[in-house]
Amino acid sequence: MSRLPATPFSAAEAEAERHRLTEDVLKFIAAGVDSAVPNFNDYCLRMFALHYEVNAIFREFCDAKKVKPGDISRWQDIPMVYNDVFKTHLVASFPLEKSVMACLTGGTTSLTQRGRIFRDEDGKRLVFSANRQMTESYLFPDFVGGKRCRILILAPSPELAPSMGMAIGMDQTRLAFGTPDSMFLLSKSGVDVNALIKALRESEASGVPVALIGATSAYVYFFQACRRKKMSFRLPPGSRICDGGGYRGRFGVVTRDDYYAMVQEVIGIPNSHCVNVLGEAETATNLFDDSLRRCVKGLLPKKRTRPVPPWSRVLAMSIDDLKPLPDGEVGLLAHWDLANVPTVLAVITDNLGYTTDGGTGCEMVGRAKIENGKVSPLPDEERTAGAMGDTAIFRMLERYVNFSIELKMMTAKDLKIEPSVREEIEARPGSVASCPQVVDEILVAQADAESAELRDDALNAFKDQTERPMDWYKSEADKQVLADHPAGLKSEKLPKKAKKKK
C-alpha cells in the first residue's frame, strides 16, 4: 500500500501511482463480483489524494468544500462531483495528450450541454474489464468455458456513432460473448427488420438460444410493430434480452411491467431472462439487475435489484442535505467507483433511487430534468406509469432543485468561476442529443424530416469525436478562445458548425 503523499506528486510519481492503482483494481475486478476488496477505504483515500493533486477542477471543488487529503479518514467523506460538472469542464486526472478513448455523454440536468469523458490506456482497460465482468456475471452467468451465443444488437454500432458509450459497450459485449454471426441491427435508416426477423426465425428453427441487447426504445418500437402485425416468435430456452438507456415515451405509454409482458408475448422470453442495465458515462461500472443470475443460481425470485460490485459503493443521498439514507428511502444515487482512476472517484447523479440489502444493492426509480430552475419529469417518467408518479418524489425533486441552485451559486461566488470554455462553446446553437434520443430519432427518421435532421446532427457529433482531443481545434478564432483559458481546459472539441435555431 502506497503512502498518502505529504508533498504534491511529481508528474512521474503521479503516473506511477495511477498505474499502481489501475493494476490493483484490475485484479479486484478479475476476482469477480462475489469477492471482496481488501482495504477498500484505503484505496479510496489513495485515489482521492492522487486526484486532488493532479486534477485542477477537482482540487478547486474540494477547496471550496474545505476538504483535502489528510482531513478525512472515510471513503464516504470524499467529495462527490455532480455529474453535470462533466458538461462544463474536462474532468480528467491524467495528461489529456494520453487520451485514447472519448465518450460523449448525455444528461438530465441540461438539454443543451453534453459532457465528454476521456480515458487514457489504463482507464480504457478499467472500463472494459469492469463491464465485461458485470456482463458475464449478470447477463451470461451460465456461460462457462468460453461459451458464446449469437447476439442481436438493437443499438448504433461504433462505426455509426464512434464515441457513443452504448455503441462501444455493446460492441465489447459482442466481441467477448458473441459468435461470428452476431450483428448490429440498427442503422442510420432504422431497424433492419428483415434481418432481425430472419435471425429470430433461425433461432426458433434450430433451437439455439440467442441474446438480444440494445436500447429499450428500439425494443418497444419493434414489439409494438409485431403486435400490430400479429407476429410472434418462440425463442428457445436460454435466450435472453438486455435493455438499457431508458424509455422516453416516444411510442406511447409503456411501463416496465408492460415491457416485460411484451417480451414474453412477442419473443417468448420469460421475465427471469429479462435484464436491465444502468450505465452512467461519468462512472466506469454499469449496474445490471440480478434476475437472470438468481434464476441460474437457483435462488428464490425476489424484487429486482442491482447488486453493487466489490470495487464500488453506491449510496442514496438525501435531497435536503446530501446525507446517506437507509435502505429503501429514495434519494440521489451517488457512486464511489475504484475503476474511475482517470476521472474522479465519487460522482453524484440526478438519478433517484434507493439502496437495498444493507447497501450492497440499489435500484433507480426515476430521473429529473432541470431547466431554468424548474423541475419536471423526463418524457419516460411523464408518460410512463410508475414511481415517478409519486408526488412525494416530485416534492423531493423540488427541494433538490432549490438546494442545488443555492449550492452552485455559492460555489460560483466563492470560487469566482468564469464561464468555462465548454460553456462558451456548447451554449452555441446545435446541442447534441443523448444516446436514447439518438435511437428514437433513428427509429422515426424515415417518416419525419425533422427527426432525420436531428439524427444526422447527432450522429455527426458522435463521429466528430476522435481518440486525440489535442487535435480538435477547428478555427483560428476557436484556437484563440482556448488559448485564453488556463491549462487543463485547452482540449475542447469544437462543433463543425453552429446551426441556427429554428
Image (cartoon, grey):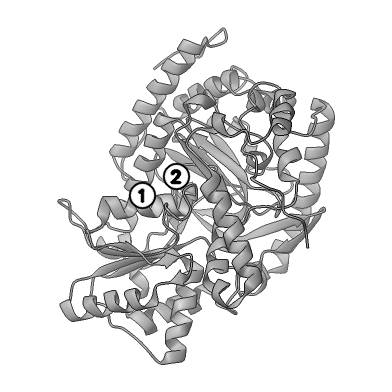
Closer to us: 293 or 128: 128
Horizontal and vertical percent position of residue 483: 70, 23
Quarter assignment of residue 407 = top right
Say what amino acid the circle numbered 2 marks: Thr
User: Total number of numbered labels?
Assistant: 2
Q: Is residue 102 above or below residue 120?
A: below
Q: Are marks 2 and 1 in contact (CB under 8 Å)?
A: yes
Q: Is residue 298 visible?
A: no
- Residues packed near mark 2 inside 10 Å, few (<14), some (14 to 19) or many (20 plus): many
Marks 2/1: CA–CA distance: 8 Å
Q: Amino acid at mark 1?
A: Met
Find the residue positioned furthest to the bottom: 230
Does residue 398 appear left or right of residue 454 in this picture?
Answer: right
Q: Which residue is identified by label 2?
A: 285
Give 447 or 304, whichever is nearer the viewer: 447
Mark 2 lies on a secondary structure that is: loop
Label 1 Cα neighbours within 10 Å, binned few <14 / some 14-19 / many ≥20: many
Which residue has dot 1 on it? 134
What residue sits 38% from the left and 55% below the top?
170
Is residue 320 among the parts visible in the rendering?
yes
Question: Could you say which quadrant of the image residue 223 lies in?
Answer: bottom left
Query: In this view of the protein, which residue sits in the foreground, 318 or 223?
Result: 223
Q: Residue at x 47, y 42 (%)?
A: 284
Q: Most extreme residue toward the top, as rendered?
A: 7
Nearest the eye: 388 or 434: 434
Q: Is residue 364 left or right of residue 65?
A: left
Question: Tag 1, which secondary structure?
Answer: helix
Locate the C terminus and report the quarter of the image it occupies. Answer: bottom right
Sequence-wise, the earlier of marks 2 and 1 is 1
Residue 440 is situated, as x and y percent measured from the top left of the image, at: 56, 68
Q: Residue at x 51, y 25 (%)?
A: 97
- Which label belongs to residue 42? none
